[in-house]
Amino acid sequence: MFNKWTFEGGIHIPYNKRLTQSLPIENYPLPQKIVVPVLMHIGAPAKVVVKVGDNVSKGQCVAEADGFVSSPAFSSISGIVSSIGMFKHISGKLVTGVEITADGRNDELRFEPIKNWREQSPSILMRRIGDCGIVGMGGAGFPTQVKLLPHRDKKVNALIINAAECEPYLTTDHRLMLEETDKILKGVKILQKILSVRYVFISIEKNKTDAIYVMKKKATTKEYYGIKIIPLETKYPQGGEKQLISTVLNREVPSGKLPIDAACVVLNVASAAAVCDAVLEGIPLTERVITVTGNAVKRPGNYIVPIGTYVKEILEYCRTDFSKIKKVIAGGPMMGKSLPDICVPVMKQTSGLLVLDTITPSYSKNNCINCGNCVKACSIHLVPSLLAKYFEKDMYEEALKRNVMDCMECGCCSYVCPAKINILHRIRTCKSYITQKRAKESLTQVK
Ligand code: SF4
Ligand code: SF4
């Protein structure tokens, strides 16, 4: 069957990855102080299990999972719990956090390694992944063990590892594939065993030729039988779950549904590496690779950073010219979060810090010229111009009927609009209005 390994819609954007793509992963020095937020995942916040004055080791749980969709958080350094309270969070809100001041001992706690993982049941492996706090490290932060759970009426027959890294500037997954190839592939085999799927696809955008080469070379060995490397067209948002499923499997996730409804699970490549650490070494998720980049950064690179390190400290370490900063984004420029304050800790799902010294032209109040560019760009077949108009006229029901909640907030529509209308902002606000309205209605019903 002929397959172009791409999806309908999307956009081609300048990638700006050259600043860091050839820079090997470096260790970031141990911070003096970290803050571990209880919310670094989708779901219920974790529950703090330490108190001020406690000595903690690296890898010690400081907040345990509190609910079905929740994930524990660990100290990434050894030290003393110096404060527990509300701290600024990447989301812009105040969130409970555990502040730890380093004691220089750097002792570490690990779980018992499960070297004989092939003989273990899926439930034991899943429990380890949950205990180690593995979440989607590409940005979403969905607890990985929840994605792996079997569903009574839904069968999974494919696993896609998302290594597309389609956001401009980010190179963490790329470097990880070059430098930790075996760790990723071992993690993938563990995930394959848990899901009991015959084939696994690792999807990588074609602009990472070296990563495709090394991954393919290793994946064809006997040890990794059943793993297929899929080179994808370089196009944004190729790393979206729905786009990947459409590209790799030629299946569509129905409106309002999840990948599991297309008999598939999608996991990030960095999470696969973390799964290997958790199962084979007993290491909980305490650090991650992030890309620090942008023209104002004099020492851009890919760094292994302890989770909880302050963004400001990292930027100082990377010799950022603070006088030039116009904007700092956590993640990529398309779907990342612009930070109103840089005194916030790095989280499990922070894939990069992008420091912009210029800001792209601002949006205007021009009228829509019905050019249709946004419709062509939308990879999930929405009509963004219409959704934006519905929002302006408070026509939320109509927006709902036109599947506004399916919008993945990729920003392609705003990017291509010649009238410079901030379509994404309108759609996002419309979605949040509908979500709040639904929450209020369900609260009234409960009362
Ligand atoms: S932001 Fe939403 S509406 Fe706009 S292109 Fe992306 S998915 Fe479509
Ligand atoms: S791209 Fe802009 S101008 Fe063109 S149809 Fe969409 S909203 Fe209207």
Image: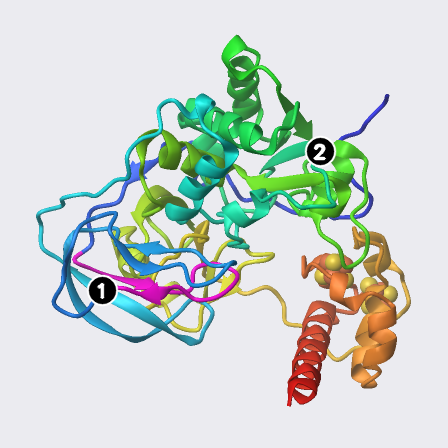
* Residue carrying label 2: 233
Where is residue 113 shown, x and y percent of the image?
Answer: 31, 31
Q: Is residue 437 left or right of residue 81?
A: right
- State the residue at coordinates (77%, 59%): 256
Q: Quadrant of ligand 1?
A: bottom right
Q: Nearer the viewer, residue 279 or 166?
A: 279
Q: Amino acid at mark 1?
A: Val
| Residue closer to the observer: 95 or 192 | 192
Q: Residue at x 67, y 47 (%)?
A: 240
* Magenta span contains residue 44: yes
**In the depicted structure, whether residue 300 falls above or below residue 140:** above
| Location of the C terminus (image quadrant) | bottom right
Q: Is residue 80 above or below residue 222?
A: below
Magenta part of the protein: which range?
32-49
Q: Residue 50: which numbered mark, if any?
A: 1
Give the Cα distance between marks 1 and 2: 48 Å
Q: Position of residue 300 (x, y in %)?
A: 37, 45
**Residue at the image position 65 percent from the left and 80 percent from the top:** 439
Report the side of 375 relative to 217 (left or right). Answer: right
Q: In the depicted view, which residue is nearer to us: 292 or 213?
A: 213
**Labelled disc at residue 76:** none
Quarter in which the N terminus is drawn = top right
Instruction: Give x and y (percent) for residue 236.
Output: 68, 46
Which quadrant of the view contains residue 234? Answer: top right
Q: Can residue 12 be seen? A: no
SS class of the residue under badge 1? loop
Q: Main secondary structure of the magenta part?
A: loop
Q: Residue 280 location, x and y as percent?
A: 36, 29
Callout 2: few (<14), some (14-19), or many (20+) C-alpha neighbours within 10 Å? some
Residue 60 visible in image: yes
Q: Is mark 2 within 8 Å of ligand 1?
A: no
